[in-house]
Amino acid sequence: MEISCNHNLRKQNTFGMDVSCACYVEYGSADELVMFFSEGKQFSLPRPFLHIGKGSNLLFTKDFEGTVFHSGIKFIRPAVPADNIPSISRTETVDVEVGAGTLWDDFCIWCAENSLWGPENLSGIPGETGAAAVQNIGAYGVEIQDIIKEVRCFDAVTCSVKTITKTDCHYGYRDSVFKQSAKGRYIVTSVVFTLSAGTGPRLAYGHLKAAAEKALAASGCKEFSPAMIRSVVLGIRDAKLPDPAKTGSAGSFFKNPVVPKIFYDRVEHYAKSKYGQDYEVPHFDAGSGFIKIPAAWLIDQSGWKGYREGNAGVWEKQPLVLVNATGKAAPEEIVALAGRITASVVNLFGIELTPEVEYI
Ligand code: EPU
């Protein structure tokens, strides 16, 4: 367990906010957490407590006056000996436990190298595995919950380690029990995934299907592999999203709003009056009379794409992503820009966007 004071968090939030926390705790195992909390050592630490992964879905709005915890639990442990993986039959599945502090994309690489299907559509998403399971990350028609079997956690109430089944995680769109009723109680220590040697690609997302078919034809291979889909997904992401190594962001800043159909009808009326009766507003039926409209489209229509204000900006290829354009943006610049975007979308469409990013 490593504890430091006045710890700078600039490298621990992908937005690159230059903020610090009063105390920072890095632990290496679930047992360390159990011992630390059983001995009551947490009582000497400043409150509140915040657990972060790679800080890829957070916006620090100021210095954090409490204690930030971070997991150094890194492992990828298949339930069968690694040497047996290549001989797994196509009808079989294999469970793999991954430490919460493992970089999510390191796990995606491991799966591609071992020809196991599961997380390939989620390749390239920044962040760590524990936070990915809390946030229920999703991309290209797949959510992490689709391959989760169970989540192992430290329970701060009972001071013990506990296994939560996928059903009890109550997964929803970028949501889980860890963000709702169990917030602050559980610290994810590892996640168990069920992977398969033979399910094949999930290509329901139209753009991915077209790009994957093109890659297959160009490769001369007879069938898709997890590595091929991973590489196609990385190509799509590179074309649309900022390179995290160069431009700070937290991915999608807002959630895609799910609205009653009457709101969608108004949006459609606006678009058809502007672009003609043949224009199709992108949307997805969310069931029960609700429609999901891409926030990127609403923001684009409101004229924000590529907008830059001081050090903050709206990514020119995907306006759902707000960026620290110069690397020097202060939290209030991002907050102000997000506020203005929200207000303008309300003005034009009567729809209130909610941040996907958590404000701290
Ligand atoms: N669009 C525009 N203008 C643009 C870009 C997009 O109008 O400049 C419209 C298009 O109609 C497009 C639609 O928005 O079809 C959707 O865009 P995209 O396919 O890029 O996906 P998204 O809904 O904006 C979601 C996730 C992303 C994920 C992609 C791909 C959320 C909040 N975001 O974005 O996740 O990578 O789908 O599946 O659900 C993240 O969570 O950080 C993230 C990047």
Image (tube, helix red, strand yellow):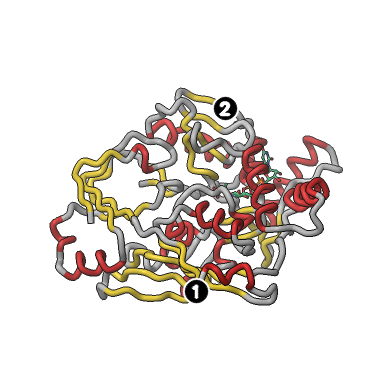
Reading the image, the residue beneath label 1 is 79
Which corner quadrant of the image does residue 187 belong to? bottom left
Relative height, residue 113 to residue 233 (above, below): below
Q: Contact (CB < 8 A) between labels 1 and 2?
A: no
Residue at the image position 40 percent from the left and 27 percent from the top: 328
Residue at the image position 45 percent from the left and 61 percent from the top: 134
Residue 163 visible somewhere in the drawing: yes
Sequence-wise, the earlier of marks 1 and 2 is 1
Camera-near label (1 vs 2) is: 1
Toward the viewer: 302 or 184? 184
Which corner quadrant of the image does residue 83 belong to? bottom right
The dot on residue 307 is 2
Residue 292 visible somewhere in the drawing: no
Relative height, residue 336 to residue 153 (above, below): above
SS type, badge 1: loop
Toward the viewer: 194 or 17? 194
Residue at the image position 52 percent from the left and 52 percent from the top: 105
